[in-house]
Image (cartoon, rainbow, N blue to C red):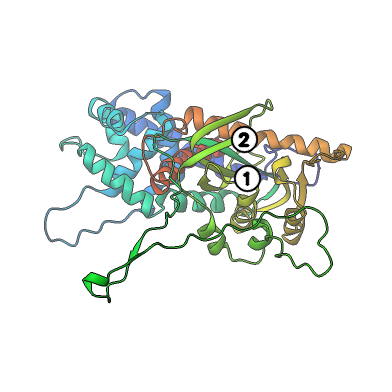
Amino acid sequence: MMKFSNPTSNAREMDANRREFIMQRWNVIQHELLPELRNDVGSLTPKLEKVIHTLEWVRIEEFTDSTWCGVGRPPIERAWLANAFVAKAVLGLTTTAALIERLSIDRALRRICGFPACKKLPSEATFSRASEEFAEARLAERVHEALVKEHLGDELIGHLSRDGTAIEARERPARTDVEVPVATVQPDLPSAETKTVAATPETPAPAKKRGRPRRGETRAPAKESPIHRQRQQTLARMIEDIPTACDRGTKCNAQGYKVSWNGYKLHLDTADCGVPVSALLSSASMHDSRAAIPLSLMSAARVTNLYDVMDAAYCSLDLHEHCRSLGHVPLIDHNPRGGQKEEFEPADAIRYNERTVAERSNARLKDEFGGNTLRVKGSTKVMGHLMFGILALSADQLMRLRQ
């Protein structure tokens, strides 16, 4: 959240009205809600106070609904379970069983999440079913979008840093099955004359010849790049075309070494105040540049920013043109691809240093909010788990702006 009367202003220079609003909300929680809870459940640890502040900021209970119509046994209140999953991300609990154990012995946390003290906690199966429902309904994604629009929608963001990070999963990579020719039987012939005809395998496409074509020779047109194709598609179609199956991925880390992993890849747009603005999940093998256009369109619908900051993996003329079409200034590190590297102008090089906020967000998500403790399978559940961590991370960064 920034004002840009001064180009060197940082994320803490926010307008007085927004700062006054944040401080007012902070004082209400600090001086009214917390003393009441202390009188009810006793002393509160700093972590529990952080859970209270996070739940007050995200207000996830406003996005949950009850489907009970008065017939049969009433279901467990989904708002309590949603609060518990947010608390799980804030407290850094690894599994659902650890969350249930903490709720059973921590009366304060149980009261904070909304579970009545006189009733038995739901079983682990109930928590798992609720987690699947939240993932399919994209609950955490909708809450995160509303949170970003409420607190950053009216602000002018200086830089959006775009980056992808590895997400390791405990599942097997998806297999790419190759169809094998199978013998076919003609059913119309008599049994004595039944013949088995082997299916002729398709001839492989000839290898592409190097150099210019000969006179009179026609060659197939070059394959259209995914980024060029995305510029002609709608956002829904782009997201639909993004692969989400678990597979193997390889990329260079910050030190320049290649690392491989089994799982997925999370793509984030992070504002220079440290708040993740939009997120997208893909297969681990997908190139980072394919997520750039969908992420930019998602972020443009939520916030207004000036610069799009990306590393050399996103170096493409199509991405430069797309950023300018949105009214943004692209700051993309040049990829020489065997040629001579083009350096930034001195002022742009200073601005490009803002991209480190993306690496800090990725590190905090993995170390503090459950990005490294993935225990679910399938892209839908994985995204649901990660979005609860992103939601907690966003609320934490917004609370830090009060300082």
Tag of residue 17: none
User: Image quadrant for the C terminus?
Assistant: top right
- Of the pair 263 and 325, the residue shown nearer to us: 263
Q: Position of residue 382 (x, y in %)?
A: 42, 43
Residue at point 77%, 41% (across, down): 333
**Seen from this angle, which residue lies furthest left?**
72
Q: Nearer the viewer, residue 52 or 123?
A: 123
For this orientation, the residue located farthest to the front is: 192
Residue 59: percent from left, percent from top: 41, 47
The residue where tag 1 is placed is 288
Q: Residue at x 85, y 38 (%)?
A: 341
Nearer to us: label 1 or label 2: 2
Where in the figure is residue 68, as x and y percent of width and height? 20, 58
- Would residue 112 be found to the left or right of residue 23 on screen? left
Q: Residues within 10 Å of mark 2 (few under 14, many from 20)?
A: some
Find the distance from the CA under tag 1 to the CA under tag 2. 10 Å
Q: Amino acid at mark 1?
A: Asp
